C-alpha cells in the first residue's frame, strides 16, 4: 500500500469504526427486566413490540428466565418478538420443555421456542414416558420428535416467522378487471374464492442526501465514494402485512393518456404504461423507520432511479389495464415498497406502495 492509499484508507477505516460504535451505543440494549418493567407499567403491547424491533437487546431466554417473564404477565406476542431478535438462545433439552410447561407457558410459545432454537432432545421410550408423566401435550412432543428450525438472519430481521406457510399457487385464474374497484396495486390472497387486497399508496418527500460517514469518506477520496440519495418512511414496518413466501400482485391501470413525466399526479395509475415503470425495493430498517436508496452521485458518475436492494419481478399482461406481477423465486422476509421509477420526479415527491412481508425465507447474504 503506497503512502497516498494509506492516507485515504486509515482515516476512513477508523471513522467507520467510530460511527459503528456510536450507532451501537446510541440506544440502551433491552433486558428481561426492561420487558417486565414495561409490562408492569401496562405499556401498550404495540409500543413494547416496536421498542424491541427498534433496538438491540441482551435478552435471557433460558427456561427459568421465560418462566419468570411469564409470571410477570409478559404476553405471547412479546415473547414471539423476543425470539425473533435474539441470537444464540440456549439449547433446549427435555427438562427445559417440562419446566416451560409446568411454568404455564402456552403450547404455542413452547413450540415457537423450539423452532427458534438448537435442540438436544431425548426421544427414547423412557424419555417419552417422562414427558407424558409431566403432562407435556402430545403436540409439543410431536414437534420435539422432528423439530424444524425457523430461519434467522440477525437482530434486525423481525419479519421472519416460525413454521411453514402454505405455498402460494402461481397459476390461479386471472381475475376480471371488474374485480377491482379502482386502479392501484393489489395483493392476491389465495384462500378459497380468492380476494384482492389493495396496497394503499404513500407519498413521501423525506429525502436525505448523504451521511456523515459518506461526507468524511468523500473528503479523503476526492469525491470517489460519492453521496447517496435516500427516501425515508415513518414507522419501522408498513401497515399492510402480507404473510407469503412468494406473493402475487395485480397492477390495475385506467388506460388514460400517458402522464407528464415532469409532474407528480395524485393518481399515477391514470397515465402509467405498465409495471415496467416501477421498481420493487427492499427497505433498510432502523430505529428511525424505513429507508430506501433512490440514487447515488460521485465525482465521476450520477445514477438516479435505482437502489441497492432492488428485487427483480416478472409480469404478464392480462389486458390493457391489468397486469399480473409475480416472482420466479421465494422473496425474503422484509419491508418492501413498489415505487414509481421516474427520476425526474424525485425532487418533488415519490409515490410508494409499501408492504411488510412476513415469512420464513432467509435473505441472501
Image: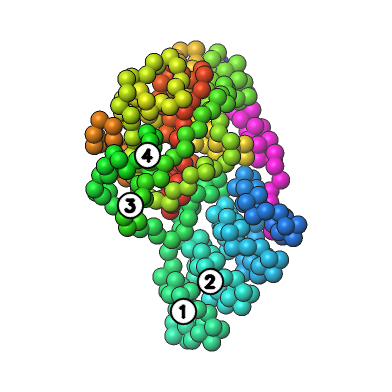
**Sequence-wise, which precedes: disc 1 or disc 2?**
2
Q: Is residue 176 left or right of residue 349?
A: left
Quadrant where the C terminus sits is top left
- Residue 79 place in picture, x, y as percent: 60, 60
Q: How many marks?
A: 4
How far separated are the C-alphas under marks 2 and 4?
42 Å
Foreground mark, 2 or 4? 4
**Sequence-wise, which precedes: disc 3 or disc 4?**
4
**Sequence-wise, which precedes: disc 1 or disc 4?**
1
- Residue 126 place in picture, x, y as percent: 47, 86
How far separated are the C-alphas under marks 1 and 2?
10 Å
The residue under the point 61% across, 58% down is 78
**Sequence-wise, which precedes: disc 3 or disc 2?**
2
Between 197 and 144, which is closer to the camera in this rendering? 197
The residue under the point 61% across, 30% down is 16
Q: Which residues lie in the magenta part?
A: 13-33
How far separated are the C-alphas under marks 1 and 4?
47 Å
Which residue bears the numbered disc 3? Answer: 194
- In the image, which disc is placed on residue 107? 2
**Sequence-wise, which precedes: disc 3 or disc 1?**
1
Label 3, secondary structure: give it: loop
The answer to if 20 sits in the magenta stretch is yes
Label 2, secondary structure: give it: helix
How far separated are the C-alphas under marks 3 and 4?
15 Å
Amino acid at each position: 500500500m503506497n503512502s497516498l492509499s494509506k492516507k485515504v484508507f486509515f482515516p476512513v477505516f477508523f471513522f467507520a469504526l467510530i460511527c459503528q460504535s456510536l450507532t451501537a451505543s446510541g440506544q440502551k440494549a433491552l433486558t428481561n427486566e426492561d420487558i417486565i418493567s414495561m409490562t408492569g407499567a401496562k405499556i401498550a403491547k404495540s409500543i413494547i413490540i416496536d421498542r424491541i424491533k427498534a433496538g438491540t437487546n441482551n435478552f435471557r431466554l433460558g427456561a427459568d428466565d421465560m418462566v419468570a417473564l411469564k409470571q410477570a404477565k409478559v404476553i405471547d406476542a412479546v415473547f414471539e418478538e423476543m425470539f425473533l431478535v435474539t441470537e444464540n438462545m440456549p439449547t433446549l433439552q427435555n427438562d427445559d420443555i417440562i419446566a416451560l410447561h409446568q411454568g404455564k407457558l402456552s403450547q404455542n410459545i413452547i413450540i415457537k421456542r423450539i423452532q427458534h432454537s438448537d435442540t438436544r432432545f431425548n426421544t427414547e421410550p423412557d424419555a417419552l414416558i417422562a414427558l407424558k408423566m409431566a403432562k407435556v401435550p402430545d403436540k409439543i412432543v410431536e414437534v420435539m420428535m422432528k423439530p424444524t428450525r425457523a430461519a434467522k438472519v440477525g437482530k434486525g430481521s423481525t419479519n421472519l416467522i416460525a413454521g411453514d406457510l402454505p405455498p402460494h399457487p402461481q397459476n390461479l385464474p386471472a381475475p376480471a378487471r371488474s374485480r377491482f374497484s379502482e386502479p392501484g396495486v393489489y395483493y392476491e390472497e389465495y384462500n378459497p374464492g380468492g380476494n384482492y387486497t389493495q396496497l394503499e399508496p404513500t407519498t413521501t418527500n423525506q429525502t436525505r442526501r448523504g451521511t456523515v460517514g459518506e461526507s468524511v469518506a468523500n473528503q479523503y477520496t476526492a469525491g470517489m465514494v460519492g453521496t447517496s440519495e435516500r427516501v425515508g418512511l415513518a414507522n419501522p414496518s408498513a401497515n399492510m402485512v402480507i404473510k407469503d413466501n412468494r406473493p402475487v400482485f395485480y397492477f390495475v391501470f385506467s388506460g388514460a393518456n400517458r402522464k407528464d413525466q415532469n409532474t407528480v399526479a395524485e393518481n399515477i395509475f391514470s397515465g402509467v404504461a405498465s409495471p415496467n415503470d416501477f421498481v420493487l425495493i427492499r427497505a433498510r430498517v432502523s430505529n428511525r423507520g424505513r429507508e430506501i436508496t433512490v440514487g447515488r452521485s460521485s465525482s465521476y458518475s450520477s445514477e438516479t432511479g435505482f437502489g441497492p436492494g432492488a428485487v427483480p419481478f416478472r409480469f404478464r399482461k392480462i389486458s390493457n389495464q391489468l397486469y399480473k406481477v409475480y416472482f420466479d423465486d421465494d422473496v425474503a422476509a422484509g419491508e418492501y415498497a413498489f415505487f414509481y421509477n421516474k427520476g425526474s420526479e424525485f425532487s418533488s415527491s415519490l409515490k410508494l406502495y409499501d408492504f411488510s412481508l412476513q415469512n420464513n425465507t432467509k435473505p441472501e447474504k
